[in-house]
Amino acid sequence: MKKDLLKTGGICPLSRRSFLKSAAAAGILSSLPAGILQAAEWERTHYEGDYETFRNACPRNCYDTCSIKSYVKDGVLRFVEGAKESTFTGGALCVKGFSYPRRVYSPDRIKYPMKQIGRGTGNWKRISWDEALTEISNKILEIKKKDGSLLGMALDKYSGNFGITHYGVEGMMSSLGYTTRFVGTPCWPAGIDAQNFDMGNMWCNDPEDIVKAKYIIIWGGNPAWNSVHSMKFVYEAQERGAKVVVIDPIMTQTAAKADLYIRIKTSEDGSLALGMARHILDKKLYSKEFTTKHSKGFDEFAAYLKKNVTVEWAAEKSGVPANVIRQIAEEFASASPATIWAGYGLQRHTNGGVNVRAIDAVVAMTGNIGIEGGGARYGHLHTWGFNYNAMVQKQPEGSVGYLGKDKIKSEFHGPEGEAQAAYSDRTININKIAESILTTNEPPIRLLWVACKNPFGQDFDRNKLKKAFDKLEMVVTVDQFFNETVQNSDIVLPCTTLFEEYTVNVSYWHYWIGLNEKAIPEQYEAKSDLQIAAMLSKKMNELEAGSCTFPQITDTKVWMEKEFNDGIHKLFGIESWEDLKNGPRKAQLPSSASWNEMKFGTPSGKYEFSSDLAAEYGHTKLPEYKAPRKAYDKFRVLTPHTQFALHSQFNNIDIMRDFNPEPFVYINPAAAAAKGIKDGETVKVVNKTGSVTLKARVTDIVAEDVLVLYEAWFGGKTDFNIQELVDDESSDMGTFKTGAPGVALHDQFAGIEKA
Amino acid sequence: MDSIKRIEAFRDFFHYGTKEKMQEAYARITDTECGLTKNIDWEAEEFLFNRLFVGPASPEAPMTASVYLDPERHTNGRITEKVREIYTAAGLSLSNRGSIPEDLLPVELDACCILKRLAEVDENFIELYEQLTAMHMYMWIPLFTERAGSCADESSAVMRVLCMLDEWIKNEVTSLVMSKEKI
């Protein structure tokens, strides 16, 4: 017996550090450009043993939405790999995806419902689900009694989990009554509006067709970190002879792979695009067919350019030499197809939306809209036509709500089925959460429900947010890990990972659909958002019959099945969701090109260089130059995504901290020398919003007037929070399609000194 | 106190994590060892317990063997599998298999109770008990109690239980070794 017992499974030959290196190496190898050496055929690990396999789909807020194949033995998730059926995922995951088993079984996961005795004290008691839901339900009933409505209950939810059934959280709120909702998006709204004004929708080419492009400009994005699977298509295009140009204020890893890197002054993207447009116009390199047949307002745009824009002016504004502007303008206009990938970073400015419009205009005037390998690529929601069954819930009879005209909007779905209701929810800009909690009255926000979001990690002006949370009577946070938002909550409810529930996922970038199966049991006492909603409904009705309409279904598979419809079946060529057990499927599209029929969704049905709709929303009809936000401190502060995390997710996983142990501020050597700052020295970055103290990295990847700090919570022993430096200044666009403007989070400024 | 009941008391102390259950288990443990339970702020003990072992913040001393024995701190990996094999050999499995790791302290203590009872009627289970305690728990509980102890107030009830748990596993293994030497 002893001999048998001691004969354990094979010992993993890889250490933690080498695991991460392997994962990173796999990602690098799978996306190597042509050279003397090339990546060998991906050598799949040969797995011995009796594993059950499951289909999963990464629900993170990421371009790639990877299709995952999960291997389970003895009820334990042993490892994951990319689904080879998806030509986008291509059998690989990013380094974050490969770390999922570590995340699922982290000792740091929140295991039980817990109540904090004194918000922020760190004195936590373990409570049962029944106790937690009773306390929350009593608070809800108390608010309803006190205010006569549930507008004092607010939901703060965004992109922590994009599984379609997670819109059940919104459904849970509706099922309780009319509530306050933080709407809009901190992510990409200015660009969404821009593309809607120009083309009538946000609709990008299939990213896999970028291989057909002859000229690729990646503008304000860093897919080498944030869309690793897209890079292999960029590399293939390069192998086929395409030129890749990266325009970015930071010399990113993507820029390092480009044929030409252009450092631009931050927020001057519009001037560069307009300068290119002027040169294309002067050289008569624009498409007469597209501009005459498929567009509206080109003559006005041309007149604007001739009157207001010169290449020299653009060079002065953007910091890009005039000869380079002329070169890329001519090359772009002469190549066919040519494409621009507009990253989300470039629209996070007070002029971000109009800058995207200027970039769209360059693509359009050169006739690159509607063709395979071309396009002004930003994102799409064409595969998101689910039922949103969990989200569409009816308010309890007699519910009283908001009588204002505001309606809920979100980029991912339409109105919530209450179009004709006399009352509505009260909607507030998600990017002004701190200010809104502090100033909203009649009734004030008393109870805040946080799900799929870490506002202290992602929302702006951390110090104001702390004051706002202090005003709230109760904060309930649903999360997997402790963070600053949980620290400022009264009750925390543990939620499941993707491997512990059923759902379905699609991407806002590629065109694949992935089933997400429940591969392992819920860990400890974790529940999915839907299970929590169902359990809350049960408790509410126990305490007051008819007070919640949410169906008391706790089987996530049942909820997942309800999301499918004929439209989804037809789009993906499936008979039912069960076909997805065989692997992810790609939408069956007549062309990989968006707008391939040249039927635009604008009022004119054409591409609109001049948009009356834009004017209705307070913008210029044409994509005219708009000056950047005025600097209020010496250095511009940029806070882009880090490589080893997705916002505040993954940062806290120990294997990530091995490679990303602490935050740094990156400063140009000349700027550092002027301040007497040496590499590795501790510095303090200060502005009107707050300050952070951290080590400096001296590097010429950043310009002399720029400081770069990667975003989000780093966990561990640091209390670093980038939101100490970011205020809630709005971007120019977003209200049209997402209900609220975005936030100009890259229009921030600060000073720096040795600590 | 009967040896099995003592292990049950340890199990309950670490399993429930509420002040009422902790107090009740503590009384059972100390009735035989230390006596009185008065002058203890059980609310503060509960907060300390959660800070050390449960969360929601990262526990300072997670009560999972893998954290101490696996070179990569990988829970549900090789160490958990080894413990699961011992349970399987004894005909045991978690009722909520896959929801919690088999090498969680209260689970292992529960297994100790069961194996000890089984060993009373079938000596084949003695070897399994030895494997679980001498070859596994003895390897990590001292590390666990040391780590937790370094983060806890020395006068706390939690600290006292940690000391007693440490003492128990050392004594248990010593007596197992001595009984073997007699043979």
Image (cartoon, coloured by chain):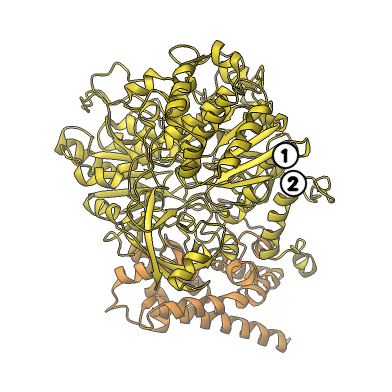
Mark 2 or mark 1, earlier in chain = 2
Residue at the image position 47 percent from the left and 37 percent from the top: A271
Q: Quadrant of residue A155?
A: top left
Quadrant where the N terminus of chain A lies? bottom right
Residue A628 x/y as whole percent: 39, 42
Q: Is residue B132 above or below residue A570?
A: below
Residue A597 x/y as whole percent: 60, 13
Chain A drawn in what color?
Answer: yellow
> Chain for mark 2?
A
Q: Amino acid at mark 2?
A: Ser
Q: Quadrant of residue A693?
A: bottom left
Residue A20 x/y as whole percent: 67, 59
Q: Which chain is orange?
A: B
Q: Amino acid at mark 1?
A: Gly
Asked if residue A574 shows in the view, the reply is no
Question: Which residue corresponds to mark 1?
Answer: A90
The crowding category of the residue bearing disc 2, from other C-alpha atoms within 10 Å (few below 14, some 14 to 19, many at least 20), is many
Q: Is residue B16 above or below residue A639?
A: below
Q: For numbered disc 1, what is the local secondary structure?
A: loop
Question: Which residue corresponds to mark 2?
Answer: A30
